[in-house]
Amino acid sequence: MRTDLFTKTFKTRPYWADIAPEVPLPATDLPDEVDVLIVGAGYTGLNAALPAVREGLGTLVVDAEHPGWGCSLRNGGQLSTSIKPSFATLKSRYGEEIATNLCREAQASLDYMHALSKVDGIDMGLREVGRFHGAHKPHLYDKLAKDCDAGHPVWKTGAYMVPKAEMPAELGTEAYHGGIVYPRHCSIDVSRYHPSLLRMALRLGAMVKENCRVVSIERQGAGFKVRTSHGPVKAGKVILATNGYTGPVSPWHQRRIIPIGSYVIATEEVPEQLIDRLFPTDRVLSDTRKLVYYYRLSPDRKRVLFGGRVSLNETDPRNSAAQLHQDMCALFPELSGVRISHAWMGFVGYTFDTLAHCGEDDGLYFAGGYCGSGVGMASYLGMRIGRKVAGLEKSPSTFERIPFRSRPLYKGDPWFLAPSVMVYRMRDRVGI
Ligand SMILES: Cc1cc2nc3c(=O)[nH]c(=O)nc-3n(C[C@H](O)[C@H](O)[C@H](O)COP(=O)(O)OP(=O)(O)OC[C@H]3O[C@@H](n4cnc5c(N)ncnc54)[C@H](O)[C@@H]3O)c2cc1C
């Protein structure tokens, strides 16, 4: 491995966690009993807490680590309509009505983020910068153009094509054969969103306890007995908000969530002129690879944050950093002398149908499985499930109406990951 790749202060810690303001938690003993206990203090858990506390429910959010330790302070800060399958696929699986409503809710997740930012005053540095999605093979540009012409059957994306000849105004790389711009996609400042959300939950009266791992959830009377590393708590209702970190406390959910590592590097500060030449816009960026690269500038426009999946099996972020750097430089050779200041990874929660899910089983609530697109969707489905707990929902989310299936032999350990990554790599080489 090249030794000159890393800065002297290099950290295997998320860049966001390094610059995020610390939110002090009041030192509270664990209560004996609460109305609602939420497991996991990321976007899902905290957005679920807001409607619960607003309705006056005694709400305790516990996290095995510290709030935001999971993906909510590790992600790329790219905000889209958060739904992976195409409308045609959804329609063939579930019929037109459900497909349409899934897409409407995906759109609603984006609208919810705007509302959180503008109406509730959650500070997340939300900017509607648009997404450039590059075609890494010529025929994939044609496919993107066909989809763009057809438009989306449910919402107006306003998407438009950028041919190769116009690339210099979009992105300083020769690697793409043009691409598509989705103008409504946004970027957020990840270092500001989670702390601001946490502050809001605390201000409204949520109790938040860190380093408090839930070890079991047992039904007891009309509610639950939740055993934690700090002792037991009786809870009327429980929300599981553990997504990619879902463990054996709920084997049913563990069998349905596939934890897949995603890896990111942050570079040291790059000279302003080079940044302006390579990234003339502030868009969030991705491409047509199955093993997608996702990248962007840091909110202060000084660093490049570059993410992807580069190894067959999970690996140390230091190892993945070298490969990510190489891949970044294949797109932007001028960055080859730029060193890495941070490298980290996190577990995204995938599902077998590549859709998020939420639901309730007699007082045990859940939202998760965002398949790597959870900034908006975890926030939105967290809010929906919190409203449901608070008795505010008149009809269930469509994500609750679709079946949430596992596969035979899957118990939470994705043994099939390495061969799947290998197949995707081969498909990416030819663009299928
Ligand atoms: C590297 C990376 C890049 C990403 N980039 C993007 C992006 O650009 N755009 C996008 O939309 N999405 C992105 N995502 C996905 C997005 O970050 C997640 O979907 C989202 O943050 C999920 O939030 P969450 O609250 O459900 O889970 P998390 O934030 O992961 O929180 C789960 C919490 O549960 C806690 N927990 C687990 N078990 C227990 C237990 N037994 N007891 C107590 N606590 C427990 C964990 O400690 C953890 O803090 C990315 C993810 C990763 C890893």
Image (cartoon, rainbow, N blue to C red):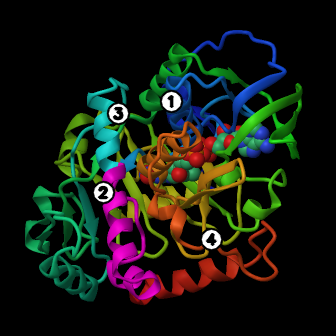
The residue that appears at 37% across and 38% down in the rendered structure is 303
Is residue 144 shown above or below 20? below
Place of residue 53 in the rendered image (x, y in percent of width and height, measured from the top left): 55, 25
Determine whether the residue tagged by mark 1 lies in a helix, strand or loop.
helix
Span highlighted in magenta in the image? 80-109
Dot 2 or dot 1: first in sequence order is 1
Rate crowding at label 1 as few (under 14), some (14 to 19) or many (20 or more) other CA atoms within 10 Å.
many
Q: How far apart are marks 4 and 2 (CA)?
A: 21 Å
- Of mark 4 and mark 2, the one earlier in the sequence is 2
Which sits in the foreground, 230 or 93?
Answer: 93
Looking at the rendered structure, the kind of residue marked 4 is Phe
Front disc: 2 or 1: 1
Which residue has dot 2 on it? 107
Circles 3 and 1: CB atoms closer than 8 Å: no
Q: Which sits earlier in the primary sequence, circle 3 or circle 1? A: 1
Judging depth in this view, the residue of 268 and 301 nearest the camera is: 301
Which residue bears the numbered disc 3?
116
User: What SS does tag 3 mark?
Assistant: helix
* Pointer 2 with pointer 3, Cβ within 8 A: no
Residue type at mark 2? Gln
Q: In this view, does 168 lie above or below 428?
A: above
Q: Is residue 344 visible?
A: no
Q: Which amino acid does label 1 sit on?
A: Leu
Q: Callout 2 environment at 10 Å: few (<14), some (14 to 19), or many (20+)?
A: many
Q: Position of residue 226 (x, y in %)?
A: 85, 37
What kind of residue is marked 3? Leu
Q: Which residue lies at the image location 54% right of the left edge and 46% below the top edge?
A: 385
Q: Where 307 falls versus 29 (above or below)?
A: below
State the separation of the CA atoms marked 2 and 1: 21 Å
In this rendering, would 423 be left or right of 34? left
Residue denoted by label 4: 404
